[in-house]
Amino acid sequence: MRGRIFAAFGAVMNAAVLLGTMWGGALEEPLGAPRVFLLAGAMVALAAGYTLLTGGIPAPKAREA
């Protein structure tokens, strides 16, 4: 499970960058650049807090021989 999570990490991060860039560009005019940066920081903090509260990335389980 852990190996699959790390294998998909790059794709998920690239998608997050793409979505963040598009949403940042769309929201910059109505909200202003400082609010967009604060909103982006709050979303990252929420994602990190959620991961922390749910136990983080699952640890590998020992295989029985």
Image (cartoon, helix red, strand yellow):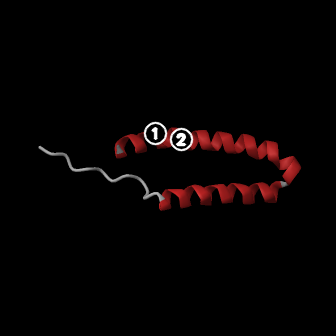
Q: In the image shown, does 47 or 13 lie closer to the viewer?
A: 47
Residue found farthest to the left: 65
Looking at the image, which residue is at 87% across and 47% down? Answer: 29
Which part of the image, by quadrant, shows the C terminus?
top left
Residue 32, picture quadrant = bottom right
- Determine the CA span between mark 2 and mark 1: 6 Å
Q: Give the image location of residue 58, x and y in percent.
A: 37, 52
The residue that mark 2 highlights is 12
Relative to 59, 40 lies left or right: right
**Amino acid residing under circle 1:** Ala
Q: In the image shown, does 57 or 19 lie closer to the viewer?
A: 57
Q: In the image shown, does 15 or 47 lie closer to the viewer?
A: 47
The residue that mark 1 highlights is 8
Looking at the image, is 28 positioned above or below residue 34?
above
Q: Give the image location of residue 50, x and y in percent.
A: 54, 57
Q: Give the image location of residue 34, x and y in percent.
A: 80, 59
The tally of labels here is 2
Q: Secondary structure at mark 2?
A: helix
Looking at the image, which residue is at 46% across and 57% down? Answer: 54
Crowd class of label 2 (few under 14; some 14 to 19; many from 20; radius 10 Å): few
Looking at the image, which residue is at 65% across and 55% down? Answer: 43
